[in-house]
Amino acid sequence: MITIKTFVFNTFQENTYLLFDETNEAVLIDAGCYSQQERDKLSTFIEEKNLTLKKLLNTHSHIDHILGNQFIIENFNLDLESNKDDEFLIKRAKDQGAAFGISIDSPPLPKKHITEGDKIKFGNSVLEIIHTPGHSPGSIVFYNKNEKFMIVGDVLFNQSIGRTDLPGGDYDTLLNSITNKLFPLGDDMEVYCGHGPNTTIGQERISNPFL
């Protein structure tokens, strides 16, 4: 059984997700920890729960979701895993940070590329990958069919969808990703968003004004 711990980090109020199961093996999705206080909060939780962090993953590579990648890589001896189509965003992160008044060194590029059909394994658990472009070209969703949840990044929100006016975004592509790839997974699928509260596919199907 997978436990999902949510941390809300940085000035963008980004959701960072730590997933672990009964083996105490864990994966971290979208490390947004930026301040030392945020880094300490995450590290302390991992230590107190006696977790072994096995993977660092990104749903996509906008700056608010990658601010903690360097810290995690250096302190937990991990490599980044994300979709290749978002690498151009990582390469632009330093300039993007400057535009928001955020100082960041050039973040590390992924050592392993993951895409639709891949499986992420940790402990007794498996996350499947769906490629969901539109918010960014390399946006991916991590989901577990049996436990009925998905980590969607900024593809879908409670009563909203991801913005598409950033480089590589496309409105029609995003709607296609949501309606043709996420909706078929079932109305009871819990949706963990990149910002804000959780929702379900069923709730968004009937009440999301964009859909």
Image: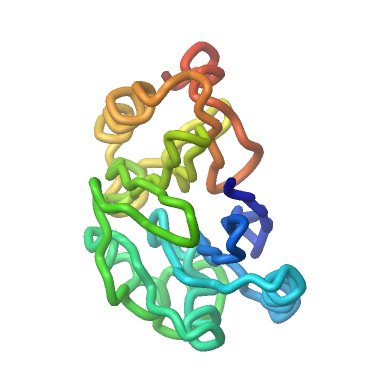
Relative to 38, 32 lies left or right: left
Q: Nearer the viewer, residue 178 or 98?
A: 178
Residue 29, horizontal then vertical, whole percent: 50, 59
Q: Is residue 75 above or below residue 156?
A: below
Residue at left offset 30%, top offset 41%? 132
Residue at left offset 52%, top offset 36%? 147
Residue 23, horizontal then vertical, whole percent: 58, 62
Residue 196, horizontal then vertical, whole percent: 64, 42
Q: Where does the C terminus fall, quadrant-wise? A: top left
Q: Is residue 165 above or below residue 148?
A: below
Residue at left offset 35%, top offset 67%? 81
Residue 41, horizontal then vertical, whole percent: 74, 72
Q: Is residue 165 above or below residue 43?
A: above
Q: Is residue 75 above or below residue 44?
A: below
Place residue 8 in its image quadrant.
bottom right
Residue at left offset 38%, top offset 23%? 183
